Image (cartoon, helix red, strand yellow):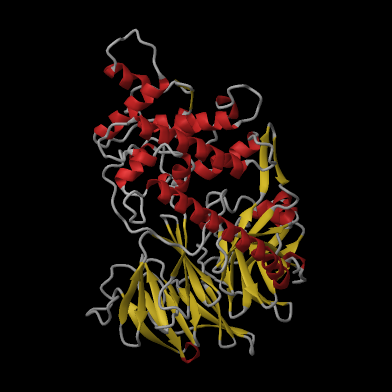
Amino acid sequence: MPDIREMDIGSSRILGIAYSRWTGGKLLLDLQITVGAGIQFVNHLSATAIFDPVTGLWNFINHPQDDKLGEDKLMPGTSYDTVWDGCIELFDDSLFLSFSGQIHKYDFKTGQWQILDFPGQKQSKLFAIEGHLYAANDETILEITDGGKATRLLASTRRRPAASALDSIDSFGSPVLFSSSNYLLCANIGSKIYGWDGKDWHEIITLDNLNSLEPIEDGFIFRSTQGNLWVWQKNQSAPDLWLSDAPKPQPGVRNNGLNQTNNPPLHPLGKSPADVPLTGCVATFFKSNLYFLVDHTIVTNQPGARTVVDKDGYNVRLVCLSRDCPEPLVVPLKFDSKLMRHVIRLGQSSLSKSTWMHFSGENLYIGQADTWGMGYISTDTIAEADKLGYWTIPISEIEANIAAQKPAMLAKKHDEDEAKRQLRDKLLAKYDHNHNGIIDPEEKEEALDDPDFIESKLDEIDANHNGWLDAEELVWFDANTNRILEPKEQAGIEIAQHLLAERLLNKFDANGDGLLDRTEFDSLQDSVIGTSKPKLLLQFVDTNNDDHLDLGELEAFLQQQTRTGLRPSGSRGSAVLNQRRTNPGQAVDPRQMFKAAVESYWQNPVVVTNRPPLNRAASVGDAVTNGAP
């Protein structure tokens, strides 16, 4: 797909792309343009570029001038005005633009702009849905009818007396409109979804902690602040939960685990890869599969230089979640440096709102809007602009790659399920003394020092799946609920720590040498504590100073994280044991110190500590690296 900046638009030069969207099978770009020669531009304009994937052609529509801003200002995407996602829309052989409190219409047949003449206009998002055109803002939802000559008011916070269920809401915020199988029109307002039956609005569903709603082909993707992702297709009465990547607990928050709520478990259709939560990645949906764009590079920060290096010969992963396959399927992609300057690190800590993927025709399209091009620019800025582009990948190649992976993935899953079944039967034969088909609490107490039993329960034990035992997870081992750490219970904890260390080592040992180097240890930290926090330096964990972590060192690191979570605010771990032992001259036994800390944790009320974050409070042995108490 050609770079739009290479298109011939006369003496104009495209400075930036403020907004991108797919609608009606076409790509719309909100462009910022300068007219003139060299860098001495004489005018600033804006335009909409329309790309038709069927013909492969671009169509450029200059926006009308806004006399209020002056001829040297851009419209609508400039530093002098707010860029509104959704302010452009294609409908009924016309282009509609919402700007400066007015809605403009461009007729492709006549090549003319006109301002729609109806009262109460305000900066709005525009939506073409099922043969209807709607405008929505923080106080109004209306349908534009008769080619823009008339409107139908569907909801208004200013209407009194209220004529619909939405009229009594103080503000609609930034509503998003779409359709579903049951309703011609739906509106997302806050965390609620409402449906319009032609006469009134009805609440359909509440999505707690809703973070974003993104259009896809024939539906929408919903993301929550709690790490959940739903997909709602138009032929469905309710959205499907595809992912549940719960945020990692903040280090320093203490919970004794004895007052946990019994919330029903979530059962998402898919799961994220081991190294990255997909709920923070750019996503799209196609043919019942959910796709994510994920970075696959190594970033190094050497003095005076920042380098980005491909891993395994490619730099982006296209991760596919499929209903008929239990594991994420990965299609490796190799992009040139143009894309990598702007798409890099997408799948790590936050969602890039300007980057998008979209399936259309026979291709997957990938691109990104850039919002830097405002006002005065320099030659360096122009050079940076020329790095942007849009990329296409044949769908046939993607589907062939995925189809080739599925047989091996399904066979692996079958073998794993069979091994779990055999292990379950073995454990029941050994510990299910009353033959009721489960291991009861009394039988669990007997099995706590059995590595096979602990391995079978490891996902249940590490409830938040962060790779180590948090203090609140230790309550699982208190089988008799007496809040005393007995020998079998402590043995079970030690077995679990060892198995978790083995699991992390196998997961992040990219080169298979049985060790973690600096890059692999950084990847482990990115996964379990997030990329937004500074990383712990390897030398604080590498006790033999060989620049690598072996299994023993990794296990010691995980044990230290557990001990850190057990400490009361403002005290050292040994203080708890000193309070309990009768002989002050007695040497400190680490296992006894751990036992005392666990029992103190179980027997004391829930408190919140004020320790520094994990990377600053990490310890070597019992010495805290930053001198914290």
Residue at coordinates 50% horizontally, 43% vertically from top-left?
Answer: 528
Where is residue 250 drawn, in percent x and y?
Answer: 41, 41
Residue at coordinates 40% horizontally, 74% vertically from top-left?
Answer: 238
373 is higher (above) or lower (below) than 45? above
Where is residue 198 drawn, in percent x and y?
Answer: 35, 88
Residue that lies at the very extreme toward the top in this rendered image: 585
In the figure, residue 62 lies in which quadrant?
bottom right
Residue at coordinates 44% horizontally, 42% vertically from top-left?
Answer: 454
Where is residue 377 drawn, in percent x and y?
Answer: 67, 53
Q: Quadrant of the N terminus?
A: bottom right
585 is higher (above) or lower (below) than 510? above
554 is higher (above) or lower (below) than 627? below
Nearer to us in this view, 522 or 74: 522
Nearer to us in this view, 237 or 463: 463
In the figure, residue 395 lies in which quadrant?
bottom right
Q: Is residue 579 left or right of residue 295?
A: left
Where is residue 44 drawn, in percent x and y?
Answer: 64, 64
